[in-house]
Image (tube, rainbow, N blue to C red):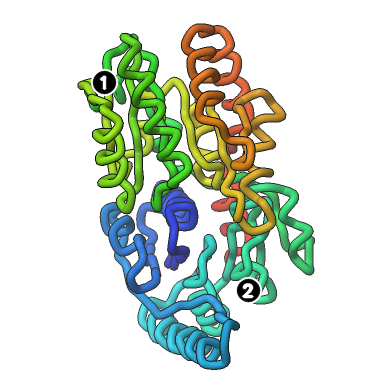
Amino acid sequence: MRVIVTGGGTGGHIYPALAIADKIMEREPDSEVLYIGNYGCIEEEIVPKAGYDLRLVAASSIDRRSLKRLFNSGKEILQGISQSKRIMKEFRPDVVIGTGGFVCVPVVIAGHSFGARCYLHEQNAYAGAANKLLESRVKRIFLGFGDAAKYFKDESKTMYVGNPVRKAFYDADRAIARRRLGIPEDDFVIFLFGGSQGSEILNEVGIEILKTVNSHKGMSFIFGTGKRHCGFVKEEAAAKGIQTGSNVMIKDYIDNMPDHLAASDLVISRSGALSVAETTVCGKASIMVPFAEAAGNHQYYNAKAVADNGGCYLIEESDLDKEDVIRKILKLYNDRELLSRMSRAALECAPVNTCDTIYAEIKKNER
């Protein structure tokens, strides 16, 4: 099978595409997979490391703030379609799969025009603009959350499958991960991260956690700040007189998420669809703080599904209190039975056989 996968701008779009690509290669090792991304986005760094060939095309959201901006964004989309059509002629795909982000627009339009079987995966409970725009050009829209079906005109095209998670998360081992990261086997490990871009509000909480971890033996803290914020976090910690010891890792970017999640006891994060899926697959108790400005408040609903099952504490931004977070951390540190119950409840929310289901549906429609 000759396959093009596309999705970009954030890890939440890129990693599901890679998970699907990995499953295709696992099931059909003689397949050829090409990834198409957008210029200047993080897929340029992530995709080659995953072992896939990468081509780049122009892509843009539709900017209606002025006629000039609208014209320029339209021009960029048309340029991307033209570039994508050339790639289609060269690569000759059987299948095109988009996982979100505006790079999907030119690629899926070109794939449909070429005659490839086209598919989308929508990770969130609230469907993205690019996926809604492309609905008429695809055979099937795979859903991470069943509620997203209502955002598409033809609900019969939709299929609930859960969110694709790479095999490495299912295979991750706590003891091995801790040895790799240099974390003591018996420590209570807190892992805070704000996504690939980082989160200012979570970083403020993280600085408070630094104080707590320093005063408790048997605790370790992995602090993923995001590249833009790492310098500020370190400066702020120093200004507050916080001395970080060997039990603290401050990282600008988390490049091995399976090991970091596997090594953790408690995860503190946003609730993007991919973060939720990966955290639950690893069976981790969590404190989730949805991004308040997410379209359709979808991060809230992502987290609510886990919170309603008892797998996480859901705290909205407007209710976020650093001292309350510390109290919750200490409660779980002192009550390991509660921690264990939350971990089991989180695992019950994990997606099961998502990539196998997607692969089977693609093969079912094979000519």
Q: Quadrant of residue 290?
A: top right
Residue drawn 32% across the image and 67% down it: 54
For the residue pair 4 and 175, the one nearer the viewer reads as 175
Residue drawn 48% across the image and 52% down it: 12
Q: Is residue 105 above or below residue 335?
A: below
For the residue pair 127 and 163, the one nearer the viewer reads as 127
Q: Quadrant of residue 40?
A: bottom left
Residue at disc 1, secondary structure:
loop
Q: Is residue 309 above or below residue 26?
A: above
Q: CA distance from mark 2 to mark 1?
A: 48 Å
> In the drawing, does residue 327 fall left or right of residue 218?
right
The kind of residue tagged 2 is: Leu
Residue 292 point in image, percent of width and height: 61, 50
Query: Which image quarter holds the N terminus?
Result: bottom left
Residue 233 point in image, percent of width and height: 31, 41
Residue 336 point in image, percent of width and height: 51, 8
Circle 1 sits on which residue? 247
For the residue pair 48 and 252, the one nearer the viewer reads as 252
Q: Which mark is residue 134?
A: 2
Residue drawn 57% across the image and 26% down it: 347
